[in-house]
Amino acid sequence: MSAPAIELRNLEKSFGLAKIIQGVNLSIEKGERHAIIGPNGAGKSTLFNLITGKYTPTAGQVLMHGEDVSGMKPFQINRKGLSRSFQITNIFHNMTVFENVRCGLLWSMGYKYSFWHMINGQKALTEKADEIIEQINLTSRRNMVAGALAYAEQRALEIGITIAGGADIIMLDEPCAGMSHSETELIVDLIRKVTEGKTLIIVEHDMGVIFDLADKISVLVYGEIIESDTPEAVRASVAVKEAYLGTTLEDA
């Protein structure tokens, strides 16, 4: 049996005396679409940052395909096949859509620190960038400066940059935040399409998105996983409902 895509073992994170993540154990299988939910202040962003290397664990381990990546730098983890998006859109606003996606491709297509290549003449690079732009439905915006895109289009572009490096583990941090219902539907369809066959880990407050996308949901409350199961089981869980202080999961 192959190792899980991501495995967390007794993971802890403290900032001074504040213990934010408290002994989390979690296994996310290859190809699984796994959502992490929880009330505000539960530690979701901290957990995301521990997995991706932005934070170093106070204790415990983060394993990626069975390899301990605890304490590795984000770029090192990225090169092992994990890519993420951010809560706040993280794109190059003064570059075109095409240039943004092309930047995301450079390392994975072998350009790395090769400063002597004239990338404008690299046919394979251009074709791959255009393929991703088509996937994210921005072909008509290819040569537009990214800062001029509508908000939902900027989020789609960030997803395009996230998948450009060919990572097999994709982590999306609130990809639908601030969107209308129609925009959300488009982004959910996009996420489903571009993460096909990949491992998806998503944090999102819109429970409609979570129950539409996820194969499995983990509920984080005060830095601890209180439930990790199918969407149906999580929806029915008394402990989860109590964690949301009487709100329904659809409203949380």
Image: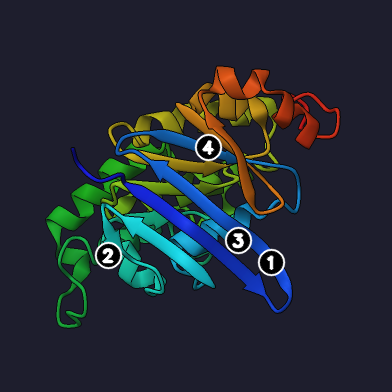
Identity of the residue drawn at 83% across and 28% down: 247
Q: Is residue 118 left or right of residue 188?
A: left
| Residue 91 seen in the current view | no
Label 4 neighbour load within 10 Å: few <14, some 14-19, many 20+: many
Give the number of the mark in front: 4 or 1. Answer: 1
What residue would you read off at disc 1? 19
Q: Which residue is mark 3?
A: 46
Residue placed at 22% from the left, 66% from the top?
A: 120
Q: Residue 206, how many percent across, how many down? A: 67, 33
Q: State the SS at label 3.
A: helix
Residue bearing the label numbered 2: 79
Q: Are marks 4 and 1 in contact (CB under 8 Å)?
A: no
- The one nearer the camera, 69 or 174, is 69
Q: Quadrant of residue 82?
A: bottom left
User: In terms of secondary structure, where does tag 1 sit?
Assistant: strand
Whole-number angstrom distance, CA of label 4 to CA of label 1: 22 Å
- Which amino acid type is marked by label 1? Lys
| Residue drawn at x 67%, y 75% as measured from the top left | 15
Lower sequence index among marks 2 and 3: 3
Query: Mark 4 or mark 2, which is nearer the start of the sequence?
Result: 4
Looking at the rendered image, the disc whose residue lies closer to the viewer, 2 or 1, is 1
Location of the N terminus by quadrant is top left
Gap in Å between the C-alphas at discs 2 and 3?
A: 21 Å
User: Which of the two marks, 2 or 3, is nearer to us in this view?
Assistant: 3
Q: Quadrant of the C terminus?
A: top right
Q: Are marks 1 and 3 in contact (CB under 8 Å)?
A: no
Disc 4 marks a residue whose amino acid type is Ala
Mark 2 or mark 1: whose residue is earlier in sequence: 1
| Residue 119 x, y percent position in the rendering | 20, 68
Residue linked to disc 4 = 35
